[in-house]
Amino acid sequence: MFSERLKASRKEVGLTQVALAEILKVSKGTVGMWETGKREPKFEVMGHLSKTLNKSVDYLLGLSDNALPQPADKTHLKESSRLQAHAEVIYSCDDYDLVLIKKT
């Protein structure tokens, strides 16, 4: 389903495989593989595809029939901005840092 929706969406906005590849900074062959279903884009590319084609990621993946991107729900951001958190490193090693979060 992804391959068909990608191809249809690309054509709908008037882009060639080459033009889409240039926008996404991938090869034309990569776009061709996506459209034939032989490969799928990496997670990071899906957001760029969504914006470029003006389609929701869920639509492109076949999870929804609603093609239009949904505006972000920012109500949770307002709530979280009221809470302040401070972080301090409590232990450090070569590969990662463990961080303790304290609510104030």
Image (cartoon, rainbow, N blue to C red):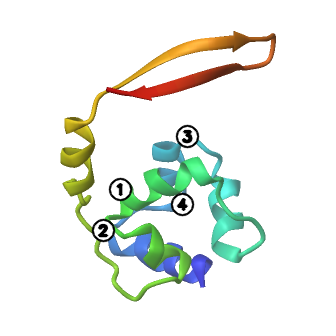
Name the amino acid type tagged 4: Gln
Contact (Cβ within 8 Å) of mark 2 with mark 1: yes
In the rendered image, residue 48, in percent from the top left (x then y), is placed at: 45, 51
Q: Which residue is located at x 36 percent, y 70 percent?
A: 55
In this figure, which residue is indicated by the disc labeled 3?
Answer: 25
User: On the rendered structure, is 85 left or right of 31?
Assistant: left
Q: Name the amino acid type tagged 2.
A: Pro
Front-most of residues 23 and 74: 74
Type of amino acid at the residue the image marks with label 1? Lys
Residue at image location 49% in from the left, 27% down from the top: 101
Q: Which numbered disc, 1 or 4, marks the residue that appears first in the sequence?
A: 4
**Above/below status of 63 relative to 16:** below
For residue 31, what is the image quadrant? bottom right
Foreground mark, 1 or 4, reads 1
Task: Report, in whole angstroms, how far the alpha carbon at label 4 lies from the one at label 2.
Answer: 22 Å
Q: Position of residue 79 (x, y in %)?
A: 22, 47
Name the foreground residue: 85 vs 47: 85
Per the image, label 2 sits on a secondary structure element best described as: loop
**Helix or strand or loop: what does disc 3 sit on?**
loop
Write down the residue under mark 1.
Answer: 51
